[in-house]
Image (spheres, rainbow, N blue to C red):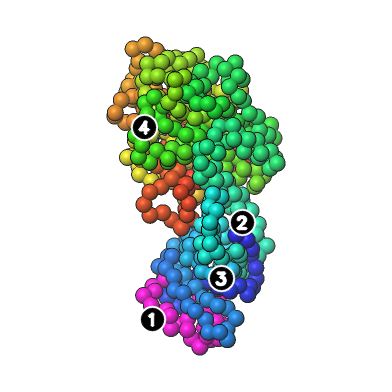
Amino acid sequence: MKISFESSSDAQIQAMIVDDGVSLPEAAEVLDKASGGLLTEALCAERFTGKVGQQAIVVMPSAVETRRVVLVGGGKPADRKAATYERIGAELIKSQSMSGFKSLALTVSEAEHAASAAAGAKLAAYRFDTYFTKLKDEQKPSLTSFAVITADPGAAQEAFVPLDAETAGTSLARDLMNEPPNVLYPENFAARAKALEVEGLEVEILGEAQMEALGMGSLLGVGQGSIRESQMAIMKWSGGGREDPVCLVGKGVCFDTGGISLKPGASMEDMKGDMGGAAAVTGTMLALAKRKAKANVIGLIGLVENMPDGNAIRPGDILTSASGQTIEVQNTDAEGRLVLADVLWYAQEHFKPRAIVDLATLTGAIVISLGHEHAGLFSNSDELAGALSAASETSGEKVWRLPMGETYDGLLKSKFADMRNIGGRAAGSITAAQFLKRFVKDGQAWAHLDIAGVAWREGSKPASDPSWPSGFGPRLLSRWIAENYEG
Ligand code: BES
Ligand code: MN
Ligand code: ZN
């Protein structure tokens, strides 16, 4: 989708925002007159109240150059926020992208609002058609350009730069999750991370031999049943001078069968998305590079495939992690924490992180607790948890904090090793977070986002989330970094 900001446009479809309470906006008056009052008539005749997202589509007479007018509800002007404009942009794409017309222009006078509407449009226009070979023309979007008619196009374009960078991060996260697991296995994912060097990131890839030398027996244990080689990618963005970095850590299980503790068959194909945390971190790194963030950020992703095999880890096996702590594996399907344990440790051994945030599709239990609306937030720092919650308010990627504590930690006790990798049936998301915390050094600010419920969603979804994966993460993290680490 080509996005532009203009002071006027001859697009085939003209869209205008109508306030709640319904009167024709100024921008629509010329077209109303030219069409002999069709727009006024549409507002009166239809059940249109101006509620956010509502649309009245009016076909123009052939004498008028504009082919269609979309009157789109904007709610009460005083209630309109960035998210409202984003939604309006997204809803317009949803209703018009297959309309047969090529160009649409939406009138939004204020620059910031114009930029938000454009970001919503871009998110909604996302498609992943790579593997369709037989799409007919009418199954492909017709709309190729989305213009925002605005008072100061230059200012709107400038306000759009960071939002556009973040939507690029979201799209990359979605692409990575959409790819099938026979294509996106650990080495291929690592290669895609490496390819981001053209954006100005510095990317290092570690293979199994290097991770073995580092003693990463926990991560390597998960990958040992796979014919694919496990990898770790370290992506650096250095935009902040000499300051210590923020570290982002991602779970990248490119496919999670459960291993020997095999998952049931139903919907197992969704487990190609079990690298959603790594996708979010990679997308964030792209967003930071594209908007030239004034911060030092390091993204670290552990990439493995969890397979049942003669060489796979068994329930009962004891793994030694890079931290030296031993782990009795009681369930090979609780593999994400085994991967993160070693990557978290690596981050603290090699850098002095001002904060670490890890993202992981870690537990089914978080879907039961919070559904598809909020990611679970766990942290050892009220300040960090507060900052992430604040960024989640403005980014639209919501988080909800859950408790931690010693009694939960006690559930990880093992008869044979320093800990076991499951805590029993109760509080499954919390005991998973407690497990990770055992690999966070004292005094290290750390937060964990369990995104199993939001990385892909069931049920009704916003227009800005049109594909299977949501691409959750880059917008939240980019804003959190902007609000806290960029001076
Ligand atoms: N990748 C899954 C968690 C998951 C479930 C993500 C549903 C997305 C949707 C994770 O590796 C897993 O299998 N967790 C187990 C942990 C259990 C064995 C303690 C789970 O949640 O059942
Ligand atoms: Mn699992
Ligand atoms: Zn998993």
Which residue is label 1 attached to?
A: 45
Which residue is label 2 attached to?
A: 160
Q: What is the three-letter code of the residue carrying label 3? A: Phe
> Quick check: marks 2 and 4 in contact, CB under 8 Å?
no
**CA separation in Å, label 3 and label 4:** 46 Å
> Quick check: marks 3 and 4 in contact, CB under 8 Å?
no
Q: At x 55% / y 38%, what residue is drawn?
A: 183
Q: Picture coordinates of residue 388 (x, y %)?
A: 48, 40
Q: Picture coordinates of residue 350 (x, y %)?
A: 61, 23
Q: What is the three-letter code of the residue carrying label 4? A: Lys
Q: Quadrant of the C terminus?
A: top right
Which residue is label 4 attached to?
A: 263
Nearest to N terminus: mark 4 or mark 1: 1
Q: Is residue 318 magenta?
A: no
Nearest to N terminus: mark 2 or mark 1: 1
Q: Picture coordinates of residue 110 (x, y %)?
A: 58, 65
> Quick check: marks 2 and 1 in contact, CB under 8 Å?
no
Q: At x 54% / y 28%, what residue is drawn?
A: 228
Disc number lying in front (4 or 1) = 4
The region drawn magenta spans: 25-50
Q: What is the three-letter code of the residue carrying label 1? A: Ala
Element under label 1?
helix
Mark 4 residue CB less than 8 A from any atom of ligand 1: yes
Crowdedness of circle 2 by 10 Å Cα count: few (<14), some, many (20+)? Answer: many
- Can residue 264 be seen here? The reply is yes
Q: At x 57% / y 45%, what residue is drawn?
A: 172
Q: Residue furthest bottom?
A: 36
Q: Which mark is residue 101?
A: 3
Nearest to N terminus: mark 3 or mark 4: 3
**CA separation in Å, label 1 and label 3:** 25 Å
